[in-house]
Image (cartoon, helix red, strand yellow):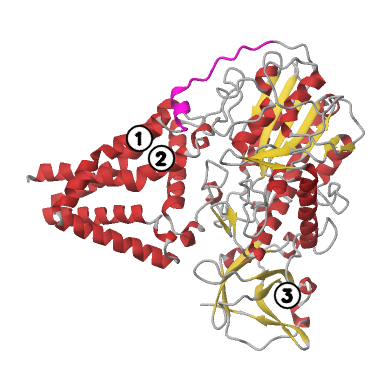
Amino acid sequence: MSERRELARDGLHLLVLCSFALAQPLFDLIARNPEFFATRRSSAVEIVAFAVGLTLAPPALLLVIEALAGLVSRGLRRGLHLVLVGVLVALVALPAIPRVADGTAVVLVGAAAIGALAAFGYHRVRALRSLVTVAAFAPPLFAGLFLLGSPVTPLVLAREPTVALKPVSARTPVVVLVMDELPITSLMDERREIDAVRYPHFAALARDSTWFRNATTPHGVTPSAVPAILTGRYVSNDALPVVADHPHNLFTLLGASYRLNVSEEVTELCPEQLCRVDRQGLRARLGSLAVDVTVAYGHVVAPPGLRERLPSITGTWRDFGSGDGKSPTRNVPVIRSDQSTRLDRFLPAIEPSARPPLHFLHLLLPHGPWKYLPSGQQYESTTSYPGLTDERWTTDPWLVTQSYQRHLLQLGFADRELGRLIARLKRTGLYERALLVVLSDHGVSFKAGGWRRPVSPGNVADVAATALFVKRPGQRQGRIDDGLVRTIDVLPTVADVLDVPLRGPVDGLSVYARARPARRRLDVMTDSGARIEVDPGSLERAKSATLERKLALFGAGGERPGLFGVGVHPELLGRRLDELPKAAPSGLRVRVDEAERLRSVDRSAGFVPARIIGRLTGPGAGRRLDLAIALNGRVAALSRTHTTGERPWFSALVPESALREGNNELEVLAVSAGADGLRVEPLAAAP
């Protein structure tokens, strides 16, 4: 065979193997999550270009590398080709091996062995090479099915409809804030009221509005939950969160007569004829897409031990690596929250205008990744969710408790952002005159061994029970309504208060309807499209159990143990180290990640190293250990070691007040109980 024909054949084989190793896994992942494109407002041309590029670019690049090697020698090119064949087959095998083997090293060695065996067979057995040639139909088939036979197809073929808009006579300003991943129990104190110490702006809103304490959502995922809010209808799982699938919504109801200030996240229900869309430039979009595809692919093929180190792709659909950017100084992450930046752009448009305004903002808070303290300071630079694999929590309660803690702290940041919005409404005089609706699209669950958000009988109360506050124009006295309302009631409520006729059928009913029927059964749609039914009594008991557990773990605002007081021995918090009895050295050592950040704390940078992560080595490191984290001579936090991953590790959050400007002295201590009480063992730093 001539060199040219051999190179062409090898290029075809690279195309086939890349389609199985790279293209098809990503096609499958994105087809199951078409929001990947919907949230980017990707055009049909961009989606087709993505499919073609993903199919052709990787094998083309590998073929160029092979050709360059061939300029040196034919033998080098042939050897390189066999290596590439082995690597691609190993990538195909990687996702399947964890089903039969545990451990990152075992999985990687197993995949390497399969790849090496495949490369050897490919080299020695002509029939295997012929089989790869025959499989040349696969690349165009995979791309074609992705574009024309998957949930992505409507985005490729459909055009945004031109919605017929009708003027309305209403003049009342409307403000709608949708928060994300906020179960109502997270806001509540021991009296089942809003915790005014931790969340003062939510509490202030409750004093001025009607708080529907038993509100629920019919959907546990944002691409369905937000359209349900905006349309007043139950949403089928195969509907995309775009205006083509939801033409009758809040924006098209008021768009002919109202000035729209709309900031959507995840959805595209406001037609471009009404809402100006800020698109990134093509180069920026392609760069973001390339980064996100790389991270998503890592989650497809990486063993669990490595997958935990990747940025999370849970529920964000884009900008997966955005939490890892660095500021120009001291390698500290860029701290400006994307959500704060969106609010910065949104608030100036709240101003007096001749036309009545509709201000709508979907804020991805307190949605993870959790990395913000209530003050707005960032403490984390990664987007990982330790203890969460494929949306199911680990069975380690301590690791789940720490995630719960971080959620509640980030809820404090969400409260701060709510305060910014309300302050702007008051400055512009809209707070008194507007219909203000503040709600969450769905909740989230924190139960060891349970699902975080996919709806199940075990978490339906945590996911379904949401926040809903409605302040009518001129309302000054708050009240609590314990009626069973749903988020699909929001659009009918807006139409009712504004006295505007709805343009299409709705499943919801105004929360102010005089003859509001009693809902005896509530249903929430699962990811598979099935519905979980629950009676209100069972839902209330489950909510109460979640609230009691939260209070037992964290107390309420101003009460012990507090959000930073979780741990096995809370009596140690605040104690000076020189007051504590010391245990004999055991040989344990500790290595703290990025410990240098503690030596140069600068609060003005917007980042504080409040999350301490470390790994233990030495005798007994593999057993469960209780730890105390001391800063500047006092115990600031408590923790326990985890055995997930390759080595025993721990993490802890310390309060901002424990950190001083400049240098901070950190000590990690093992805590043990003896006949004479607790003892601590300062752990030496590992080399």
Point 17% across, 46% down: residue: 130
Mark 2 lies on residue: 27
Which element type, helix, strand or loop, lies under badge 2?
A: helix
Whether residue 235 is situated above or below residue 29 in the rendered picture: above
Q: Label 2 amino acid?
A: Phe
Instruction: Name the spot of residue 89 as percent of width and height, x first.
Output: 30, 54
Quadrant for residue 416, please give it. Answer: top right
Q: Which residues are magenta?
A: 151-166
| Residue 413 is covered by the magenta coloring | no
Q: Residue furthest left?
A: 1
Mark 1 lies on residue: 143
Whether residue 90 is situated above or below residue 460 in the rendered picture: below
Q: Label 3 amino acid?
A: Gly
* Most frequent secondary structure within the magenta stretch: loop
- Name the mark nearer the viewer: 1 or 3: 1
Instruction: Name the spot of residue 619 as percent of width and height, x first.
Output: 55, 83
Inter-mark Cα distance, 2 to 3: 54 Å
Mark 2 or mark 1, earlier in chain: 2
Left or right: residue 58 compared with residue 536: left
Point 50% across, 35% down: residue: 34
Inter-mark Cα distance, 2 to 1: 8 Å
Which element type, helix, strand or loop, lies under badge 1?
A: helix
**What number is the disc on residue 419?**
none
Left or right: residue 500 compared with residue 301: right
Inter-mark Cα distance, 1 to 3: 61 Å
Q: Nearer the viewer, residue 566 or 599?
A: 566
Whether residue 402 is situated above or below residue 411 in the rendered picture: below
Tags 2 and 3 in contact by the CB under 8 Å rule?
A: no
Point 71% across, 13% down: residue: 257
Which element type, helix, strand or loop, lies under badge 3?
A: loop
